[in-house]
Every structure is written in structure tokens, then in C-alpha cells.
């Protein structure tokens, strides 16, 4: 509907004015709404061309500021006059690097939700019988897998296998979708702006203002083993696969950022602060499992859940321990780098000090006796990063905040 009103009938519904200082967008016919965005407030511009938009020779433009977004349509060849033309590509990663970045960027839980939404939409468009056949394939695969596990004397409930097969299929679907979105990836730079282009079916073009945001390096257990990870800026992947030893060079080339050398990490006495929660859950699941065997409780599904809970908790504890030795804060008079765990990932953010709006030190009762604290830095782009279990006296001495 938006495409019909704001592109096909745009002469009646849209008035777009571009000047050297601002963008003015007026939408509507009877009830008109005018939005004005100063060019100085723009932090990101995204052009998207789906298959439908490509048929009509159009593209959707989203202009982002820290406080809002403007959306409108232009012709395929239409340009925003205030943007420079991108220069030659600074970085054009190989396919295997793009595949690695897509792998890291694909979340299992997010894939389940996306796949479920696609199945629901397909059932409306092409009919529910085709979706039912696809579900039947998952069920049949789960039955064959149950037989294979039975051959090795491994008893797993059918419902658990079916859910695992569905989750794996959802992840594969989400991965292929992400891979298509990142294919043809290239980065270029002009006048302090970064230009990122990618996509096969849907084409994406991003323009990023690099000097007023945090560049974020995202680590998982796979990234730690491969010693490389994707780099993001303003929620857009800047590089799909950056080697750990080349991170500082990449940041300086693309963003002009520098990682300060005076790195402060959690001491060994912070071990329990990082692993107490998952180890506690592992103990609870283990105690319940022992109790289930002690009273000869024969519900296999419950035992499977308890085993799974204990394994996941121990895995989480090991992961948190690995992240502890890689967590740190470093700062000088111009830049700050902070590595903090969020969920099952470790994020390293590098940003100029001038975008820090608030710094907070926190101490629990247990941290006071060990001289530890948490450091939370809030940025103007409404994001925050928290480093945990740092020595308080050293932190106050080494950092300017």
C-alpha cells in the first residue's frame, strides 16, 4: 500500500525537497504531514531494492537520525544530491569470508521466528497443503533420526527430535537468507562517509557516518576458535570477517578509530563473578537428575530436559570463563575500547570519547570485599556497554571517565 501511494501515485501524495541544509518530506493528500530533517543530524542512509521495486525501477530510501527516520521512494537512478559519489572499493571480501560473516550473524532463535513467519505467509498465499507437506518432511526426518539413535541405544523423545529438526531447518533457512543478503559485499569510502553494497535478490546500499558511532566487533565461540569475527557500525555489517590481528588496522582505515593500548582486564579473583550463575544452574540440574534416578523416575522426557539443562549450563560457564579473559577496558584522551559480554556473545566496542554521555560504576556487596566493580558507558546513539568485575582502583587511575 505504501508503494502504491508513495511511489506509483507520488505526484499526488508526496513532496520531497532536498536543500543544502535539510530534507523536507510532505506526505498525504487530505491530511498532510511534513517532516524536516537537518543534514547535520543524519547518521545513516539505507537504499533497498526488492524484486518488486526492481521491476518498477524504484528503490526505498530510509534516512536515519538519532531521533527518528524518514522513508520515501526514488527512481532507480535517483540520487540524494548532498551525497558524494563513492570511490573505488576499499574492501571486497571473498565468498568464504562472506559465508563466515553470514554464519556468525545468523541467530538460531531468530531463524525459528523468521521461518515460522514465512510458513504462515506461504500458507496464506499458496495454500496450507504445501506447508503441511513441508511439516510432514520434518516429521519424517525426525522419525528416521529416532530410529538411528535407537540403533545406538540412545533414547530421545520424538517431540524433542522433531523440535530439534525444525530448529535446524529454520537455522539453515535463515543462514541462506543472510548469505543472499551479504553476497556481493563491498565497502568504499568518500568524504568521511562509508558506502556498503550487498545483496542478490534484494539489493542494499548503506551510507554511514563513521565518526559519531561505536564500531562493534562481535565474538562467539566460533570466532574465538577462528580468530576472526564480523565488524559492525550502526547495526550494519562493515566487514564480514576481520582477523583479530588486523582489527586495529581495519578500524583506522575505515573509521579513523584507534584502540588505546592500556588494557585493563578482570583479575583471576573475578572467576566466581563470571561463572557463578551458570555453575549454580548446573548444580541444580545435576541434583534433580540424581534425584530422578534415585527414586527411579522413568519419564525419559524429564531426564532428557535435565541432562540438556546441565550440559547447557556447563557450556555457558566455560564460555563465560573464556570471555572473562578477553573482557577489558582501555581509554586515552581520544578513544575508548570496551569489551563486554551480552548473552552468549562478546562485543568489543571502539568509539571516540566525545560520544560518551554517561559513565557509571557499580559495586555489589560481594564485589566490595574484592575491590571489584562494573563499568557502564552510555553513548549518544542510545547504546550502552558494560564491563564487569574490573579492579576499581586501577579503573579510576587508568581511565578518564
Image (cartoon, helix red, strand yellow):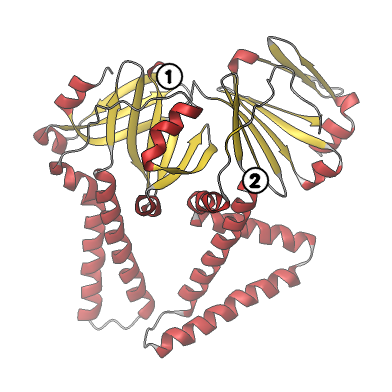
Of 208 and 2, which appears nearest the observer? 208
Q: Give the tally of numbered discs.
A: 2
Q: Residue 126: x and y, percent?
A: 79, 64
* Label 1 Cα neighbours within 10 Å, binned few <14 / some 14-19 / many ≥20: some
**In the image, is residue 117 above or below residue 26?**
below
Q: Is residue 236 left or right of residue 226?
A: right
Q: Is residue 353 visible?
A: yes
Of 249 and 372, which appears nearest the observer? 249
Q: Residue 125: x and y, percent?
A: 79, 60
Q: Is residue 214 visible?
A: no
- Name the quarter where the N terminus is drawn: top right
Identified at 85% across, 44% down, the residue is 55
* Label 2 Cα neighbours within 10 Å, binned few <14 / some 14-19 / many ≥20: some
Q: Which mark is residue 355?
A: 1
Identify the mark nearer the N-term, 2 or 1: 2
Residue situated furthest front in the rendering: 88
Corner quadrant of residue 75: top right
Residue situated furthest bottom in the rendering: 151
Q: Residue 288: x and y, percent?
A: 24, 69
Check disc 1 and report its element: helix, strand or loop: helix
Q: Is residue 58 left or right of residue 43?
A: right
**In the image, is residue 166 above or below residue 200?**
below
Identified at 51% across, 40% down, the residue is 239
* Residue located beneath label 2 in the image: 184
Corner quadrant of residue 339: top left
Q: Which mark is residue 311?
A: none
Check disc 2 and report its element: helix, strand or loop: loop
- Name the quarter where the C terminus is drawn: top left
Q: Residue 188: x and y, percent?
A: 60, 31
Amino acid at each position: 500500500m505504501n508503494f502504491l501511494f508513495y511511489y506509483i501515485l507520488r505526484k499526488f501524495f508526496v513532496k520531497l525537497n532536498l536543500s543544502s541544509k535539510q530534507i523536507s518530506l510532505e506526505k498525504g493528500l487530505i491530511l498532510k504531514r511534513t517532516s524536516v530533517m537537518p543534514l547535520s543530524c543524519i547518521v545513516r542512509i539505507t537504499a533497498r531494492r526488492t524484486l518488486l521495486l526492481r521491476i518498477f525501477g524504484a528503490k526505498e530510501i530510509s534516512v536515519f537520525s538519532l531521533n527518528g527516520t524518514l522513508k520515501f521512494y526514488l527512481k532507480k537512478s535517483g540520487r540524494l544530491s548532498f551525497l558524494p559519489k563513492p570511490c573505488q572499493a576499499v574492501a571486497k571480501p571473498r565468498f568464504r569470508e562472506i559465508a563466515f560473516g553470514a554464519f556468525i550473524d545468523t541467530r538460531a532463535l531468530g531463524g525459528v521466528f523468521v521461518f515460522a513467519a514465512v510458513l504462515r505467509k506461504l500458507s496464506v498465499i499458496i495454500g496450507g497443503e504445501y506447508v503441511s507437506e513441508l511439516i510432514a518432511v520434518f516429521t519424517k526426518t525426525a522419525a528416521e533420526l529416532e530410529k538411528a539413535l535407537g540403533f545406538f541405544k540412545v533414547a530421545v523423545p520424538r517431540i524433542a527430535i522433531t523440535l530439534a529438526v525444525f530448529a535446524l531447518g529454520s537455522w539453515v533457512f535463515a543462514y541462506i537468507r543472510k548469505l543472499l543478503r551479504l553476497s556481493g559485499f563491498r565497502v568504499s569510502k568518500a568524504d568521511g562517509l562509508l558506502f556498503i553494497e550487498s545483496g542478490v535478490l534484494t539489493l542494499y546500499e548503506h551510507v554511514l557516518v563513521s565518526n559519531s558511532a561505536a564500531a562493534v566487533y562481535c565474538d562467539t565461540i566460533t570466532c574465538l576458535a577462528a580468530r576472526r569475527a564480523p565488524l559492525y557500525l550502526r547495526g550494519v555489517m562493515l566487514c564480514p570477517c576481520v582477523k583479530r590481528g588486523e582489527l586495529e588496522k581495519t578500524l583506522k582505515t575505515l573509521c579513523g578509530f584507534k584502540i588505546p593500548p592500556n588494557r585493563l582486564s578482570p583479575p583471576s579473583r573475578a572467576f566466581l563473578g563470571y561463572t557463578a550463575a551458570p555453575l549454580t544452574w548446573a548444580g541444580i540440574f545435576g541434583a534433580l537428575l540424581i534425584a530422578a534416578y534415585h527414586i527411579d523416575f522413568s519419564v525419559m522426557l524429564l531426564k532428557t530436559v535435565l541432562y540438556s539443562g546441565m550440559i547447557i549450563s556447563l557450556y555457558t560457564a566455560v564460555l563465560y570463563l573464556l570471555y572473562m579473559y578477553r573482557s577489558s577496558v582501555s581509554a586515552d584522551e581520544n578513544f575508548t575500547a570496551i569489551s563486554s559480554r551480552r548473552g552468549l556473545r562478546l562485543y568489543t566496542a571502539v568509539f571516540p570519547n566525545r560520544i560518551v554521555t554517561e559513565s557509571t560504576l557499580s559495586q555489589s556487596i560481594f564485589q566490595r570485599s574484592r575491590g571489584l566493580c562494573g563499568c557502564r558507558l552510555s553513548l549518544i546513539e542510545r547504546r550502552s556497554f558494560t564491563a564487569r568485575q574490573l579492579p576499581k582502583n586501577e579503573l579510576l587511575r587508568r581511565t578518564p571517565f
